[in-house]
Amino acid sequence: MGKPAKNNSLSRYERKFVVTREYKSSIYYLLSVHPSLFREIYRQRKINNIYFDSIDYKFYRENVAGIANRKKVRLRWYGEMYGQIQATLEIKSKHGLTGTKQSFLLPSFNFTDQTNIMDIKKLLLQSTIPELIRQELFTLEMTLLNRYERRYFLSFDKKFRVTVDDSLNYFRIDNNTNISESFMTVDPNTILELKYDYQHDVDAHYISNQFPFRVSRNSKYISGIEFIRL
């Protein structure tokens, strides 16, 4: 396995809003009365991610600095955190305000609190991802595990998607130790993201102005690293 699961080669815009605890109860009401008539399109589900970075946190530093061309590398799977999982390797590239994503489905494997970097490398060897990508991954370290609940909404004209991420948990994970839930941190904020293709950017300003929340450069990877390590 390792064939592309889904490659989003077209540029996509994202506008992110950090909603603090005292206002998060209003999110779903605001979506229900929004002029774009957002409706929920998918069941709520839990998302798990393992992020990778260089030993000197190159991806983290580039994201903090707002470097125009930057990327994130992660494994993602849905549902329970532990057990037999089907993960997808995702490489997100950012070019200014737009982004693309490459996705590769990996062989299923048993993920436990004893899983370490050697288990992940064995998984990569069993996959058929492009060799250049595999070689780069072998130079990276596991730096963060996060987990949250996501709900999905779509505008009536189907041009705009909104995701709402809540119950964000961050776990310490690295090459030398196993996962420890004693090093778990809970983020009290909720993240709302407005996602759309680049050709709809003009209309997105009107869409986002209907939300009484401030646009943010929020990154769950940056937040997680700062919560857990720095």
Image (spheres, rainbow, N blue to C red):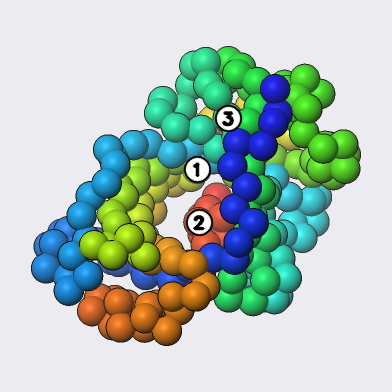
- Alpha carbon of mark 3 to alpha carbon of mark 1: how far? 14 Å
Q: Amino acid at mark 1?
A: Asn
- From the top left corner, tell me how far across and down residue 71 is, in percent: 69, 59
Seen in the image, is 146 located left or right of residue 103?
left
Residue 170 horizontal/vertical position (percent): 48, 45
Question: Which of label 3 and label 1 is nearer to you?
Answer: 3
Is 87 displayed left or right of 139 in the figure? Answer: left
Checking the image for residue 146, the label placed there is 1
Q: Report which quarter residue 157 is drawn in.
A: bottom left
Tag 1 secondary structure = strand
User: Is 3 in front, or is 216?
Assistant: 3
Query: Upstream in the sequence, badge 3 or badge 1?
Result: 3
In the image, what residue occupies the spot 59% across and 71% down? 98
Tell me: residue 164, above or below residue 206: above
For residue 178, say whether it is visible: yes
Residue under numbered circle 2: 220
- Assign the C terminus to one quadrant of the image: bottom right
Identity, as a three-letter code, of the amino acid under mark 3: Ala
Amino acid carrying mark 2 in the image: Lys
Q: Are marks 1 and 2 in contact (CB under 8 Å)?
A: yes
